[in-house]
Amino acid sequence: MKHFHFGRHGHEHAWHAMRHGFFGGGPDGPRGRGRGGERRRMFEGGELRLVLLKLIEEQPRHGYDLIREIENRSGGAYAPSPGVVYPTMTLLLDMGLAEEETSEGPRKLLAITEAGRQHLSERADEVTVAMARLEALAKVSERTDAAPVRRAMQNLKAALQDRLSQDGVSRETQLEVARILDEAASRIERI
């Protein structure tokens, strides 16, 4: 499993990761898949736990808010799935690093405990690295969020759906479409 650490060359690593669908744009959403179907994760080990803890240190948050906040801080390039966030929230509670706070409405807020603050303090360097990874992704996303490219991608998607949804699309037509797309990808990589 690759680890993406954004240091001096952080933006280059983030761009490489985004190009290959590790953080978004793929059929599996923000998590994406690498080549060969291998699932890639933005955070490894206990890093997501530290990120969530850091966010609730700033203010008590519920699960949906944590997901949206991570998405915002990555410039929309990455949003963890509820299937990862909610079990991690439960783990924070079980470890005594967070506690539930009563709130108006059905959602329970997660607030940091004194043990949670100590945990963050002891792992300050790891927290800095994990949060910097989100910031690096946001910068890459900002640099690559070009409206003309988005328009062209939507146009391509519409053309593909229109052509390939027609009755009687032959295998030869499908192969020709694939050839054109491969050629376009190759030309873009050479720019």
Image (cartoon, rainbow, N blue to C red):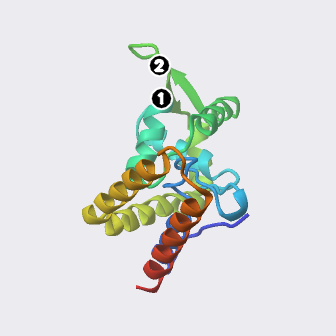
> Which residue bears the numbered disc 2?
107
Q: Give me the residue at 66% from left, 33% from top.
A: 87
Work out which quarter of the rendered image holds the C terminus and state it.
bottom left
Q: Which of the two discs, 1 and 2, labels the residue nearer the N terminus?
A: 1
Q: Position of residue 96 (x, y in %)?
A: 66, 32
Q: Position of residue 47 (x, y in %)?
A: 62, 53
Q: Give me the residue at 66% from left, 66% from top.
A: 3
CB atoms at circles 1 and 2 under 8 Å apart?
yes
Residue 63 visible within the image: yes
> Is residue 63 positioned above or below 42 on the image?
above
The kind of residue on which mark 1 rests is: His
> Which residue bears the numbered disc 1?
62
> Is residue 56 positioned above or below 191 on the image?
above
Disc 2 crowd rating (10 Å Cα; few below 14, some 14-19, many 20+) is few
For the residue pair 111 and 174, the one nearer the viewer reads as: 174
The number of discs equals 2
Residue 125 visible within the image: no
The kind of residue on which mark 2 rests is: Arg
What kind of element bears circle 2?
Answer: loop
Q: Which mark is residue 29?
A: none
Disc 1 crowd rating (10 Å Cα; few below 14, some 14-19, many 20+) is some
